[in-house]
Amino acid sequence: MAAQRNPEWDVLCRSTHENFATAYLTDASTWPRGREIPDGMLPAAANLFAFDALIDNVDRRRENPNILARGDEIFAIDHELAFSFVHELFAREAAWRVARRSWLRDHVLYFQLRKRDHDFSAFIRRVSDLSAERLEALVREVPEAWRDESIGKISDHLKDARDHAGEFRRQIPEALA
């Protein structure tokens, strides 16, 4: 008996863009609309919200969740509109000023995370620990086909977030208020 082809693989193969993935998850399911966040998944969900705020990912919306789940594990997929400021979709703001970004209210996890206390300390520590050397190494790993003038803008954005990690930490709960 021949193995069945996964339709998602066919979509990937027809893509005209280069694609990146760290793992092919066969046992995870797409985040369904209206799914409640299980208690065990709340920390990861809050960190994903903070991550999307950090990288200006306007595309993880209720109608387009771009999340896979397996038990209490959550996996972010499809970062096509990450760093949206390079596409000039919205006015450029400082990387750490996220409290008033209206698009965050349409984030797939916003309504379930809002008005709750979340511990962002580990996430913020990782942002503040992003050394110049590590950032340069990450930039060097970007495939040549993806290199354009936006790489410098993205690097500057991440440096700005790192340099203002404390302010960013205060902004995330405000965005969820």
Image (cartoon, grey):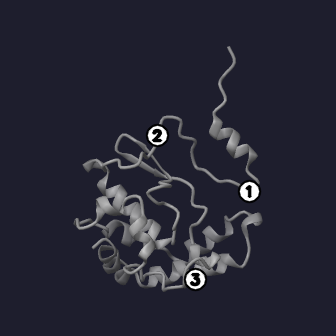
Classify residue 91 by image quadrant. bottom right
Residue 136 in sight in this render: yes
- Rounded to the nearest whole Å, what is the CA distance between mark 2 and mark 1? 24 Å
Horizontal arrangement in the rendering, residue 158 relative to residue 37 (left or right): right
Instruction: From the image, tell me which residue sits under label 1.
Output: 17
Q: Residue at x 67, y 77 (%)?
A: 150
Q: Residue at x 73, y 56 (%)?
A: 17
- Rounded to the nearest whole Å, what is the CA distance between mark 3 and mark 1? 25 Å
SS assignment at label 2:
strand
What kind of residue is marked 2? Ser
Mark 2 or mark 3, which is nearer to you?
Answer: 2
Mark 3 or mark 1, which is nearer to you?
Answer: 1
Which of the two residues, 116 or 164, is positioned nearer the viewer here?
Answer: 116
Q: Looking at the image, tell me whether mark 3 or mark 1 is earlier in sequence order.
A: 1
SS assignment at label 1:
loop
Horizontal arrangement in the rendering, residue 124 relative to residue 65 (left or right): left
Instruction: From the image, tell me which residue sits under label 3.
Output: 156
Residue 25 higher or lower than 103, as above or below: above
Residue 117 higher or lower than 18, as above or below: below
